[in-house]
Image (cartoon, grey):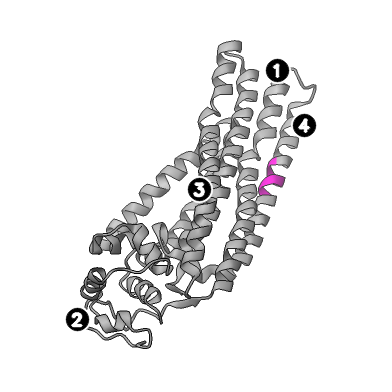
Protein backbone atom coordinates (compact mmCIF):
# COMPACT_ATOMS: atom_id res chain seq x y z
CA UNK A 1 0.00 0.00 0.00
CA UNK A 2 1.48 3.35 -1.03
CA UNK A 3 1.47 6.51 1.09
CA UNK A 4 -1.49 8.04 -0.77
CA UNK A 5 -3.68 5.05 0.09
CA UNK A 6 -2.46 5.00 3.69
CA UNK A 7 -3.35 8.66 4.23
CA UNK A 8 -6.81 8.12 2.75
CA UNK A 9 -7.34 4.92 4.74
CA UNK A 10 -6.26 6.43 8.08
CA UNK A 11 -8.31 9.59 7.52
CA UNK A 12 -11.47 7.63 6.80
CA UNK A 13 -10.91 5.28 9.75
CA UNK A 14 -10.86 8.34 11.98
CA UNK A 15 -14.01 9.66 10.33
CA UNK A 16 -12.32 12.90 9.24
CA UNK A 17 -13.03 14.88 6.11
CA UNK A 18 -10.16 16.27 4.08
CA UNK A 19 -10.88 19.66 5.64
CA UNK A 20 -10.57 18.15 9.14
CA UNK A 21 -7.19 16.57 8.38
CA UNK A 22 -5.95 19.72 6.65
CA UNK A 23 -6.76 21.73 9.78
CA UNK A 24 -4.91 19.27 12.01
CA UNK A 25 -1.82 19.34 9.78
CA UNK A 26 -1.91 23.08 9.10
CA UNK A 27 -2.21 22.73 5.33
CA UNK A 28 -4.87 23.40 2.71
CA UNK A 29 -7.55 20.90 1.70
CA UNK A 30 -6.08 20.93 -1.79
CA UNK A 31 -2.80 19.63 -0.37
CA UNK A 32 -4.59 16.69 1.24
CA UNK A 33 -6.39 16.00 -2.04
CA UNK A 34 -3.12 15.94 -3.96
CA UNK A 35 -1.47 13.64 -1.41
CA UNK A 36 -4.39 11.20 -1.50
CA UNK A 37 -4.51 11.13 -5.30
CA UNK A 38 -0.70 10.67 -5.45
CA UNK A 39 -0.26 13.94 -7.35
CA UNK A 40 2.32 15.16 -4.83
CA UNK A 41 4.19 14.01 -1.71
CA UNK A 42 4.16 15.62 1.74
CA UNK A 43 7.52 16.79 3.06
CA UNK A 44 9.21 15.15 6.06
CA UNK A 45 7.80 17.64 8.57
CA UNK A 46 4.27 16.78 7.43
CA UNK A 47 5.08 13.06 7.59
CA UNK A 48 6.17 13.48 11.22
CA UNK A 49 3.03 15.48 11.98
CA UNK A 50 0.84 12.82 10.34
CA UNK A 51 2.57 10.16 12.41
CA UNK A 52 1.47 12.00 15.55
CA UNK A 53 -2.04 12.80 14.32
CA UNK A 54 -2.79 9.27 13.12
CA UNK A 55 -0.92 7.57 15.94
CA UNK A 56 1.21 5.40 13.63
CA UNK A 57 4.93 5.08 13.02
CA UNK A 58 6.72 6.95 10.25
CA UNK A 59 7.94 3.58 8.93
CA UNK A 60 4.34 2.53 8.33
CA UNK A 61 3.67 5.71 6.36
CA UNK A 62 6.84 5.68 4.29
CA UNK A 63 7.43 2.00 3.58
CA UNK A 64 5.02 0.58 0.99
CA UNK A 65 5.75 -3.00 2.00
CA UNK A 66 4.42 -2.44 5.53
CA UNK A 67 0.70 -3.18 5.33
CA UNK A 68 -0.20 -3.62 9.01
CA UNK A 69 -0.66 -0.45 11.04
CA UNK A 70 2.12 0.07 13.59
CA UNK A 71 0.33 2.08 16.22
CA UNK A 72 2.04 4.61 18.44
CA UNK A 73 -1.12 5.43 20.39
CA UNK A 74 -4.86 4.89 20.33
CA UNK A 75 -5.46 7.87 18.06
CA UNK A 76 -6.97 5.72 15.34
CA UNK A 77 -10.51 4.75 16.17
CA UNK A 78 -10.94 1.01 16.42
CA UNK A 79 -14.36 -0.11 17.48
CA UNK A 80 -15.18 -3.77 17.12
CA UNK A 81 -18.83 -2.87 16.65
CA UNK A 82 -18.09 -0.76 13.55
CA UNK A 83 -18.25 -2.84 10.36
CA UNK A 84 -15.32 -2.89 7.93
CA UNK A 85 -15.46 -0.40 5.10
CA UNK A 86 -16.72 -1.74 1.79
CA UNK A 87 -14.13 -1.55 -0.97
CA UNK A 88 -15.09 0.40 -4.11
CA UNK A 89 -13.09 -0.26 -7.29
CA UNK A 90 -12.41 2.17 -10.13
CA UNK A 91 -14.91 0.30 -12.32
CA UNK A 92 -17.62 0.49 -9.64
CA UNK A 93 -16.99 4.20 -9.09
CA UNK A 94 -17.19 5.00 -12.82
CA UNK A 95 -20.35 2.92 -13.18
CA UNK A 96 -21.90 4.67 -10.18
CA UNK A 97 -21.20 8.16 -11.58
CA UNK A 98 -22.71 7.17 -14.94
CA UNK A 99 -25.79 5.89 -13.14
CA UNK A 100 -26.12 9.12 -11.12
CA UNK A 101 -26.12 11.08 -14.39
CA UNK A 102 -28.89 8.81 -15.72
CA UNK A 103 -30.77 8.96 -12.41
CA UNK A 104 -30.62 12.75 -12.20
CA UNK A 105 -32.70 13.20 -15.34
CA UNK A 106 -35.33 10.66 -14.29
CA UNK A 107 -35.78 12.07 -10.79
CA UNK A 108 -35.84 15.66 -12.07
CA UNK A 109 -38.58 14.75 -14.58
CA UNK A 110 -40.59 13.00 -11.85
CA UNK A 111 -40.40 16.00 -9.53
CA UNK A 112 -41.30 18.38 -12.38
CA UNK A 113 -44.34 16.24 -13.24
CA UNK A 114 -45.56 16.47 -9.63
CA UNK A 115 -45.27 20.27 -9.66
CA UNK A 116 -46.97 20.54 -13.08
CA UNK A 117 -49.77 18.13 -12.18
CA UNK A 118 -52.33 20.79 -11.07
CA UNK A 119 -51.45 23.30 -13.83
CA UNK A 120 -54.13 22.20 -16.32
CA UNK A 121 -56.74 22.02 -13.57
CA UNK A 122 -55.90 25.54 -12.40
CA UNK A 123 -55.72 26.99 -15.92
CA UNK A 124 -59.01 25.42 -17.07
CA UNK A 125 -60.71 26.57 -13.90
CA UNK A 126 -59.70 30.19 -14.52
CA UNK A 127 -60.37 30.15 -18.25
CA UNK A 128 -63.77 28.46 -17.83
CA UNK A 129 -64.81 30.88 -15.12
CA UNK A 130 -63.82 33.84 -17.32
CA UNK A 131 -65.70 32.47 -20.29
CA UNK A 132 -62.56 32.10 -22.39
CA UNK A 133 -63.07 28.33 -22.65
CA UNK A 134 -66.60 27.18 -23.49
CA UNK A 135 -66.75 24.17 -21.22
CA UNK A 136 -68.96 23.10 -18.37
CA UNK A 137 -67.43 23.54 -14.92
CA UNK A 138 -67.67 19.82 -14.15
CA UNK A 139 -66.05 18.94 -17.47
CA UNK A 140 -63.18 21.36 -16.89
CA UNK A 141 -62.64 19.94 -13.40
CA UNK A 142 -62.75 16.36 -14.69
CA UNK A 143 -60.20 17.04 -17.44
CA UNK A 144 -57.93 18.84 -14.99
CA UNK A 145 -58.15 16.02 -12.42
CA UNK A 146 -57.42 13.38 -15.06
CA UNK A 147 -54.28 15.29 -16.08
CA UNK A 148 -53.30 15.72 -12.43
CA UNK A 149 -53.67 12.04 -11.58
CA UNK A 150 -51.92 10.97 -14.80
CA UNK A 151 -48.89 13.15 -14.09
CA UNK A 152 -48.69 12.13 -10.43
CA UNK A 153 -49.11 8.47 -11.39
CA UNK A 154 -46.36 8.76 -13.99
CA UNK A 155 -44.07 10.46 -11.46
CA UNK A 156 -44.69 7.74 -8.89
CA UNK A 157 -43.87 5.09 -11.49
CA UNK A 158 -40.61 6.86 -12.29
CA UNK A 159 -39.68 7.08 -8.58
CA UNK A 160 -40.46 3.40 -7.98
CA UNK A 161 -38.46 2.17 -11.00
CA UNK A 162 -35.45 4.39 -10.32
CA UNK A 163 -35.59 3.49 -6.64
CA UNK A 164 -35.33 -0.20 -7.50
CA UNK A 165 -32.46 0.48 -9.92
CA UNK A 166 -30.66 2.60 -7.31
CA UNK A 167 -30.56 -0.22 -4.77
CA UNK A 168 -27.50 -1.74 -6.46
CA UNK A 169 -25.50 1.33 -5.36
CA UNK A 170 -27.25 1.90 -2.04
CA UNK A 171 -24.14 0.90 -0.09
CA UNK A 172 -22.17 3.87 -1.48
CA UNK A 173 -24.69 6.30 -0.03
CA UNK A 174 -25.34 4.56 3.28
CA UNK A 175 -22.34 2.42 4.23
CA UNK A 176 -18.74 3.19 5.14
CA UNK A 177 -16.71 2.77 1.96
CA UNK A 178 -13.01 2.62 1.10
CA UNK A 179 -12.05 3.52 -2.46
CA UNK A 180 -9.21 1.81 -4.30
CA UNK A 181 -6.10 3.66 -5.40
CA UNK A 182 -6.80 6.30 -8.04
CA UNK A 183 -10.56 6.50 -7.46
CA UNK A 184 -10.31 9.57 -5.23
CA UNK A 185 -8.30 11.51 -7.83
CA UNK A 186 -10.60 10.42 -10.68
CA UNK A 187 -13.72 11.56 -8.80
CA UNK A 188 -12.20 14.92 -7.90
CA UNK A 189 -11.11 15.50 -11.48
CA UNK A 190 -14.59 14.75 -12.83
CA UNK A 191 -16.17 16.92 -10.15
CA UNK A 192 -14.01 19.87 -11.15
CA UNK A 193 -14.99 19.40 -14.80
CA UNK A 194 -18.67 19.34 -13.82
CA UNK A 195 -18.43 22.32 -11.45
CA UNK A 196 -19.25 24.94 -14.11
CA UNK A 197 -22.32 22.99 -15.28
CA UNK A 198 -23.45 22.52 -11.68
CA UNK A 199 -23.08 26.20 -10.84
CA UNK A 200 -24.83 27.34 -14.03
CA UNK A 201 -27.80 25.00 -13.63
CA UNK A 202 -28.15 25.65 -9.92
CA UNK A 203 -28.14 29.44 -10.32
CA UNK A 204 -30.52 29.27 -13.30
CA UNK A 205 -32.91 27.03 -11.36
CA UNK A 206 -32.90 29.34 -8.35
CA UNK A 207 -33.47 32.39 -10.54
CA UNK A 208 -36.43 30.72 -12.27
CA UNK A 209 -38.00 29.94 -8.89
CA UNK A 210 -37.46 33.51 -7.69
CA UNK A 211 -38.90 35.17 -10.81
CA UNK A 212 -41.80 32.71 -10.99
CA UNK A 213 -43.97 35.17 -9.06
CA UNK A 214 -43.49 37.89 -11.70
CA UNK A 215 -46.41 36.71 -13.92
CA UNK A 216 -48.71 36.73 -10.88
CA UNK A 217 -47.76 40.29 -9.91
CA UNK A 218 -47.90 41.42 -13.54
CA UNK A 219 -51.44 40.05 -13.87
CA UNK A 220 -52.46 41.93 -10.72
CA UNK A 221 -51.03 45.20 -12.08
CA UNK A 222 -52.50 44.82 -15.57
CA UNK A 223 -55.86 43.14 -14.87
CA UNK A 224 -56.47 44.20 -11.30
CA UNK A 225 -58.71 41.84 -9.34
CA UNK A 226 -59.51 39.62 -12.31
CA UNK A 227 -59.87 36.06 -11.03
CA UNK A 228 -59.25 34.63 -14.48
CA UNK A 229 -55.94 36.47 -14.91
CA UNK A 230 -54.81 35.57 -11.40
CA UNK A 231 -55.64 31.89 -11.85
CA UNK A 232 -53.93 31.60 -15.23
CA UNK A 233 -50.86 33.48 -13.97
CA UNK A 234 -50.70 31.03 -11.05
CA UNK A 235 -50.49 28.19 -13.56
CA UNK A 236 -47.64 30.04 -15.30
CA UNK A 237 -45.96 30.46 -11.90
CA UNK A 238 -46.01 26.70 -11.38
CA UNK A 239 -44.47 26.14 -14.83
CA UNK A 240 -41.57 28.45 -13.93
CA UNK A 241 -41.13 26.68 -10.58
CA UNK A 242 -41.23 23.26 -12.27
CA UNK A 243 -38.49 24.25 -14.71
CA UNK A 244 -36.37 25.75 -11.93
CA UNK A 245 -36.73 22.74 -9.67
CA UNK A 246 -35.96 20.42 -12.59
CA UNK A 247 -32.58 22.10 -13.08
CA UNK A 248 -31.81 22.20 -9.35
CA UNK A 249 -32.66 18.53 -8.80
CA UNK A 250 -30.78 17.38 -11.89
CA UNK A 251 -27.47 19.08 -11.14
CA UNK A 252 -27.67 18.40 -7.39
CA UNK A 253 -28.22 14.66 -7.95
CA UNK A 254 -25.06 14.44 -10.05
CA UNK A 255 -23.10 16.64 -7.61
CA UNK A 256 -24.11 14.51 -4.63
CA UNK A 257 -22.77 11.44 -6.44
CA UNK A 258 -19.24 12.88 -6.25
CA UNK A 259 -19.62 13.59 -2.53
CA UNK A 260 -20.92 10.08 -1.87
CA UNK A 261 -17.77 8.52 -3.30
CA UNK A 262 -15.52 11.01 -1.52
CA UNK A 263 -17.53 10.72 1.72
CA UNK A 264 -17.69 14.50 2.07
CA UNK A 265 -20.35 17.14 2.80
CA UNK A 266 -23.57 15.29 3.68
CA UNK A 267 -22.00 11.85 3.26
CA UNK A 268 -19.25 11.66 5.88
CA UNK A 269 -19.33 8.48 8.00
CA UNK A 270 -20.98 10.41 10.83
CA UNK A 271 -23.66 11.91 8.59
CA UNK A 272 -24.33 8.52 6.97
CA UNK A 273 -25.13 7.06 10.37
CA UNK A 274 -27.32 10.07 11.14
CA UNK A 275 -29.14 9.87 7.80
CA UNK A 276 -29.82 6.16 8.35
CA UNK A 277 -31.53 6.97 11.63
CA UNK A 278 -33.62 9.69 9.96
CA UNK A 279 -34.68 7.54 6.99
CA UNK A 280 -37.79 6.07 8.62
CA UNK A 281 -38.80 9.47 9.99
CA UNK A 282 -38.52 10.96 6.49
CA UNK A 283 -40.78 8.28 5.04
CA UNK A 284 -43.47 8.93 7.63
CA UNK A 285 -43.16 12.70 7.30
CA UNK A 286 -43.50 12.90 3.51
CA UNK A 287 -46.23 10.27 3.50
CA UNK A 288 -48.23 12.50 5.85
CA UNK A 289 -47.45 15.56 3.71
CA UNK A 290 -48.86 13.87 0.59
CA UNK A 291 -51.96 12.71 2.49
CA UNK A 292 -52.59 16.21 3.85
CA UNK A 293 -52.10 17.81 0.44
CA UNK A 294 -54.54 15.48 -1.32
CA UNK A 295 -57.11 15.54 1.49
CA UNK A 296 -57.18 19.34 1.76
CA UNK A 297 -57.19 19.78 -2.03
CA UNK A 298 -60.08 17.38 -2.66
CA UNK A 299 -62.12 18.67 0.27
CA UNK A 300 -61.69 22.39 -0.47
CA UNK A 301 -61.23 22.03 -4.25
CA UNK A 302 -58.82 24.95 -3.91
CA UNK A 303 -56.06 23.43 -6.04
CA UNK A 304 -54.88 26.93 -6.91
CA UNK A 305 -53.97 27.48 -3.25
CA UNK A 306 -53.11 24.10 -1.70
CA UNK A 307 -49.79 23.88 -3.58
CA UNK A 308 -48.42 26.04 -0.75
CA UNK A 309 -48.31 22.82 1.31
CA UNK A 310 -45.09 21.76 -0.47
CA UNK A 311 -42.81 24.74 0.27
CA UNK A 312 -44.12 24.74 3.86
CA UNK A 313 -43.47 21.01 4.17
CA UNK A 314 -39.96 21.44 2.76
CA UNK A 315 -39.04 24.11 5.30
CA UNK A 316 -40.69 22.25 8.17
CA UNK A 317 -38.89 19.02 7.29
CA UNK A 318 -35.51 20.55 8.06
CA UNK A 319 -36.80 21.70 11.45
CA UNK A 320 -38.28 18.27 12.25
CA UNK A 321 -35.01 16.48 11.41
CA UNK A 322 -32.94 18.97 13.42
CA UNK A 323 -35.20 18.56 16.47
CA UNK A 324 -35.12 14.77 16.12
CA UNK A 325 -31.30 14.79 16.04
CA UNK A 326 -31.08 17.03 19.11
CA UNK A 327 -33.50 14.82 21.07
CA UNK A 328 -31.62 11.71 19.97
CA UNK A 329 -28.30 13.14 21.20
CA UNK A 330 -29.80 14.14 24.54
CA UNK A 331 -31.29 10.68 24.91
Q: Does the magenta segment cover residue 97?
A: no
Residue 206 placed where, x, y %? 51, 37
What residue is at 50 percent from the left and 71 percent from the top? 171
Find the distance from the CA under tag 1 to the CA under tag 4.
Answer: 15 Å
Precedes in sequence: disc 3 or disc 4: 4
**Number of the front mark, 2 or 1:** 2
Give the label on residue 251, or none. none
Task: Determine whether label 1 and label 4 are within 8 Å by CB.
Answer: no
Quadrant location, the N terminus? bottom left
Residue where numbered disc 3 is placed: 289
Q: Which tag is nearer the camera, tag 2 or tag 3? A: 2
The range drawn in magenta is 148-153
In the rendered image, which residue does mark 4 sit on? 139
Do residues under tags 3 and 1 come within 8 Å of each other at their CB atoms? no
- Which of pointers 2 and 4 indicates the residue nearer the eye? 2
Q: State which mark lies toward you, 1 or 4.
A: 1
Q: Earlier in the sequence, mark 2 or mark 1?
A: 2
Of all residues, the one furthest to the right in this rendering is 134
What is the CA distance from the residue labelled 2 to the residue labelled 3? 50 Å
Describe the element under mark 1 as helix, strand or loop.
Answer: loop
The C terminus lies in quadrant: bottom left
Instruction: Give the Cα distance between marks 2 and 4.
Output: 76 Å
Relative placement, left or right, of 191 versus 19 is right
Q: Earlier in the sequence, mark 1 or mark 4?
A: 1
Quadrant position of residue 294: top right
Mark 3 surroundings within 10 Å by alpha-carbon count, few (fewer than 14), some (14 through 19), many (20 or more): some
Amino acid sequence: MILADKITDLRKKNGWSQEDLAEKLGVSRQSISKWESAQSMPDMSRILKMSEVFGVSTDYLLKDEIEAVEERSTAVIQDEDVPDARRVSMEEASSFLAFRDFLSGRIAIGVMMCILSPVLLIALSGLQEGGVVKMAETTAAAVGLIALLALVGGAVAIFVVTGLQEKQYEYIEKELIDTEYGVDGMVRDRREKYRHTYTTQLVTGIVLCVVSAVPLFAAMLIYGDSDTASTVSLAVLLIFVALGVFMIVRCSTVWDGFHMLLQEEEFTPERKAENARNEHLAGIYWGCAVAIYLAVSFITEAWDKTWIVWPIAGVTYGVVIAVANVLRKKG
